[in-house]
Amino acid sequence: MKTIIVMITIAVLAAAFARPLYNKDKSKKATAGNNNGFVVAELFTSEGCSSCPPADKLIQKITQENTGKSVYVLAFHVDYWDHQGWKDRFSDAAHTERQRRYAGWLNLETVYTPQMVINGHKEFIGSYENNITKAITKELAQPAAQTISLRPHVEGNKLHVDFTAAAQKNAELVLALVQKTATSNVKAGENTGRHLTHVQIVRQLYTQDVSDNKKIMLDLPGDFNANAFELIGFVQQKKNGRITAAAKAEW
């Protein structure tokens, strides 16, 4: 292992790695409507980072231990490690850009991997299990301020989503199309020779104002399989990044 945490300044990232962001199934409605607490746990990770596998294992554990609870795990594979010898096939510049937004919201000087963000307003080193577990427990005990419902359905290679959320200014709807599991054999970089297991991989990310059109259409990846994917959506405040409602839907 080279370094426990690799930190890269936002300015360096922006200069060096920035690039432009870029048959009908039965639909199921998902609603977070009972005002119980919820958690959106976002892990920023990479197959090229030798410190990330423990964090990847931790989100597997979090996912398993919170089955049936309103705990929504998202793994964002960032792209700035792709220049270090191994290109992560799940990496995306949009994921790096999302992490940069958190650096601004949370007054951080750097972005790094592995990083965990809880409900948009708390961040931890992504492998620090005790701190993360305590934060999840605390957030679940807080009543949800708002609700959101999602109704997705698939037509060909398109995903259509109807959503309902309380109208509000300065808030965004964020939709993440999530692949539940995957494995990779890493052949270069810091994790050379390792067989990595991933969960909750964000494959498509979509953001719009909550007040905009309530009908959304997304392109599906070529390997989409309804049994292997799920949709997670949440409402996020533009000013400070705090997440105020979340829900999950499958097909």
Image (cartoon, rainbow, N blue to C red):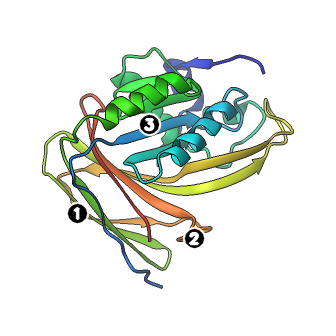
Q: Which residue is mark 3?
A: 98
Residue at screen point 75% across, 49% down: 184
The location of residue 175, given as percent across then percent down, is: 38, 53
The location of residue 182, given as percent across then percent down, is: 67, 54
Q: Left or right of 7: which side holds 106?
A: left
**How far is mark 3 from mark 2, CA to CA?**
26 Å
Task: Give SS at disc 3.
Answer: helix
Instruction: Tell me if I can see residue 160 in this picture.
Output: yes
Among numbered discs 1 and 3, the one appearing first in the sequence: 3
For disc 1, the neighbor class at 10 Å (few under 14, some 14 to 19, many from 20) is: some
Which numbered dot is residue 214? 1
User: At label 1, which amino acid type do we have?
Assistant: Lys
The location of residue 61, given as percent across then percent down, is: 58, 41
Residue at screen point 57% across, 56% down: 180
Q: For residue 92, which quarter of the picture? A: top right
Residue at screen point 59% across, 44% down: 60
For disc 2, the neighbor class at 10 Å (few under 14, some 14 to 19, many from 20) is: few
Q: Nearer the viewer, residue 5 or 14?
A: 5
In which quadrant is the C terminus drawn?
Answer: bottom left
Q: For residue 221, which quarter of the picture? A: bottom right
Q: Which residue is mark 2?
A: 225
**How far is mark 1 from mark 2, CA to CA?**
25 Å
User: At label 3, which amino acid type do we have?
Assistant: Arg
User: At label 2, which amino acid type do we have?
Assistant: Asn
Task: Give SS at disc 2.
Answer: loop
**As displayed, is residue 165 above or below residue 107?**
below
In front: label 3 or label 2: 2
Among numbered discs 1 and 2, the one appearing first in the sequence: 1
Task: Give SS at disc 1.
Answer: loop
